[in-house]
Amino acid sequence: EVQLVESGGGLVQPGGSLRLSCAASGFTVSSNYMSWVRQAPGKGLEWVSVIYSGGTTYYADSVKGRFTISRDKSKNTLYLQMNSLRAKDTAMYYCAREGVVVRGIFDYWGQGTVVTVSS
Amino acid sequence: DIQLTQSPSFLSASVGDRVTITCRASQGISSYLAWYQQKPGKAPKLLIYAASTLQSGVPSRFSGSGSGTEFTLTISSLQPEDFATYYCQQLNSYPQLTFGGGTKVEIK
């Protein structure tokens, strides 16, 4: 059974850093395209970043230069390093697996981890 | 950037009603559109992709249509478990993906 479990969220001050983790089971993270998607309180969904199976990464303009997506093959885990955090980064952060046949759709999601940026 | 506008943003309906949600793209996106359902406190769930292809395990009362700039999600007979928020998502500018603002379906 495919499962994604995020962790690492919390309260951080503006300008601070946080690293989110997404532990996967039932499939291999490094063989799939994996994304982070966030949702600000009471708002809609916003795609944040993707890492391809080959290692290529892309970011939304809103986080480019501040966030870094990565993975650890031995731990079958996806990460999101978030630096220079701003109040607007406050959100629930989900990791999600892209479809294998159809890229760009998300067929499995984690339960999310909450990031709050506030002084 | 491709913008997606959903309408209505809020919908009140009764069990058994036929419900239609519209998603309009700011430019043509062919059939590169997906729909998700999100219940409170839960992650989104994929319902439809390629504008009209039902994801495995999704009830057949859900259907999608459209191409270019206008798309619809239809629930043929609303069930109690369908009360949720629905989002469209475009894949045309992959890997830069965007979602619509959401349509909340509530019980009348």
Image (tube, grey):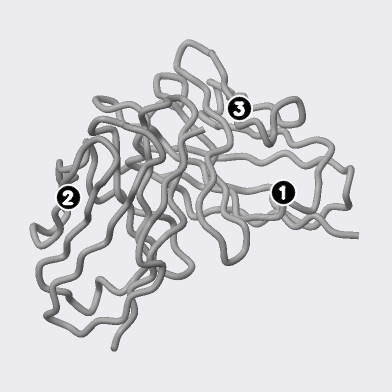
Which amino acid type is shown beneath numbered disc 1? Asp
Which amino acid type is shown beneath numbered disc 3? Tyr
The residue sitting at 38% across, 54% down in the picture is B87
Q: Dot 1 surroundings within 10 Å: few (below 14), some, or many (20 or more)?
A: many
Q: CA distance from mark 3 to mark 1?
A: 14 Å
Q: Which residue is mark 2?
A: B64
The residue sitting at 62% across, 24% down in the picture is A70
The residue sitting at 40% across, 19% down in the picture is A31
- Rendering coords of residue A107 (x, y %): 32, 41
A54 or B18, nearer to the observer? B18
B65 or A56, nearer to the observer? B65
Which amino acid type is shown beneath numbered disc 2? Gly
Give the left or right position of residue A74, taking residue B39 as reference: right
**Quarter of the image with the N terminus of chain A in it:** top left
Q: Chain of mark 3?
A: A
B98 shown above or below B10:
above
B37 shown above or below A18:
below
- Rendering coords of residue A109 (x, y %): 42, 46
Q: Chain of mark 2?
A: B
- Rendering coords of residue B11 (x, y %): 33, 75
Q: Secondary structure at mark 1?
A: helix
Q: Which residue is mark 1?
A: A89
The image quarter in which residue B66 lies: top left
Mark 2 or 1: in front is 2
- Give a yes or no on whether discs 3 and 1 share a subunit: yes
Q: Which residue is mark 3?
A: A59
